[in-house]
Amino acid sequence: MLNLKDKQLFREMGLIDGAWIAAASGATVDVHDPAKQAAIGTVPDMGSAETRNAITAAERAQRSWKRKTNAERAALLETWHDLMLENVDDLALILTTEQGKPLDEARGEIRYGASFVKWFAEEARRINGHTIPSPTPDRRIIVLKEPVGVCGIITPWNFPNAMITRKVAPALAAGCTVVIKPSEFTPYSALALGVLAERAGIPAGVINIVTGMPAEIGNEIMRNETVRKISFTGSTRVGSLLMRGAADSIKRLSLELGGNAPFIVFDDADLDLAVEGALASKFRNGGQTCVCANRLLVQSGVYDAFAAKLKAKVDAMKVGPGTEAGVSIGPMINQAAIEKIDRHVRDALAKGAKIITSARQLPDGRQYTAPIVLTGATTEMELAGEETFGPVAPLFRFETEDEAIAIANGTPFGLASYFYTDNLKRAWRVGEALEFGMVGLNTGSVSMEVAPFGGIKQSGIGREGAQAGIEEYLEMKSFHMGGL
Ligand code: NAD
């Protein structure tokens, strides 16, 4: 059914212990192309039994994987990275076909995803322990770093490649093995990574991929005592469910959850730079990103000028299938996404907001939505309280710096935030006052492999990328040598 360039790059099967297999029941789940709302293929609908098998395989594989030298593990990761880049076009086409984002963005995601594999291949060589000066002369104390063990990796549909590599690369570098449960909406990008890992020579059982509907698979990952860590990216609702489920066996957790990013434009900002940043932050992936500007706070003095410049750029955006040239907004992932966007816009209009972007004809298909700019947004509107996850840019007006900071921080979430100013003192003041894991000053992008990525408050626990990223997969062991 699939019409992709290199069908060999993925399989319509799960991957357990090096074997590509169907569900024991034979059941399957359809995978859709959101641009056509048509099924493009199936994957096995696996459950507890297959997940248990995958966990057992990962445990077995870990015994030898952790004994490889760090340089050996690094070399395998390097090969995996190289294969990702060699196959960037095919991986991007698979990604766009199941997820919808424009092909150029999909290529960008593959390169971004690969950058984590490269980075953690390098970090694998630097898993250094340390020594501690002993309080007594007859003792020496060293701290060893050891892999956590088998990790459950649960990922969302909005970055189906990079959310996997950002977790799996540090896990493997540290000496852990993994059971991946990709989103049921975007399993092929995960399976393609599995094919390339196999080609790279990563041993059977080190990476296992269990496909299907989430409840049973998630439950087994949560409850199974062999799984020592869960790394999850997705909604705060599911993150909190996993946290509760993981409590009984005291698993380690990394949670990358939802955001509600403020994007503040002060009177003294470079407006063109701010518009450019707003476009990148708000409209990338059709607004379906966790670090997406959700609330654009604009100071009174530049409100109208900023609104007019943003409107002109948004009016020029092309909406259509991600595979079509020049498209910057693809289809949304599913009908539920469209309904949430519509609900937020209807609520905002009922409470006094106005759409200033021009009306446009959308391509055929129910999963498209127009990118819009809304003026007159207020904190009473639904879109101020939760992620819209769509191409809607609501502009809130503010008068003073204190007011902007209070609005920005007035959310239980704390993932990304952005602000624009040319005033150095204000840059420090506001940067320090924003209660978020990531702050962008005069930039709309805060995500790269070299810097820690993650949130505070209800946006999560732990960091990915950077040096911190590998620590999430390492335990410390204090080794005391006495009688010396
Ligand atoms: P989601 O929480 O619905 O799903 C994420 C993953 O969890 C999927 O694989 C899904 O199948 C699985 N899942 C669902 N129910 C489960 C259960 N009961 N047990 C175990 N697993 C279960 O999120 P989504 O809609 O796929 O992704 C969008 C959300 O992810 C947004 O809130 C977004 O902000 C967030 N996100 C956060 C980051 C970050 O780094 N902080 C990055 C990307 C997306």
Image: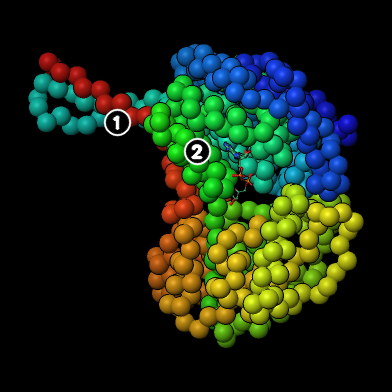
Say if 469 sits above or below 121 in the image.
Answer: below
Q: Residue at x 57, y 61 (%)?
A: 386
Residue 171 horizontal side relative to residue 444, left or right: left
| Disc 1 within 8 angstroms of ligand 1 (CB) | no
Q: Nearer the viewer, residue 440 or 239?
A: 239
Q: Residue furthest bottom?
A: 301
Q: Secondary structure at mark 1?
A: strand
Q: Give the residue type that dot 1 points to.
A: His
Residue 68 image offset from top left, x and y in percent: 48, 17
User: Residue 48: x, y in percent?
Assistant: 59, 23
Q: Quadrant of the N terminus?
A: top right
Q: In the displayed structure, does residue 463 sit left or right of residue 358?
A: left
Residue annotated with mark 1: 130
Q: Residue 200 at x, y = what percent?
A: 66, 22
User: Which disc number belongs to residue 242?
Assistant: 2
Can you tell which of label 1 and label 2 is closer to the viewer?
A: 2
| 354 shown above or below 443 | below
Circle 2 sits in a helix, a strand or a loop, which is it? helix
Q: Which mark is residue 57?
A: none
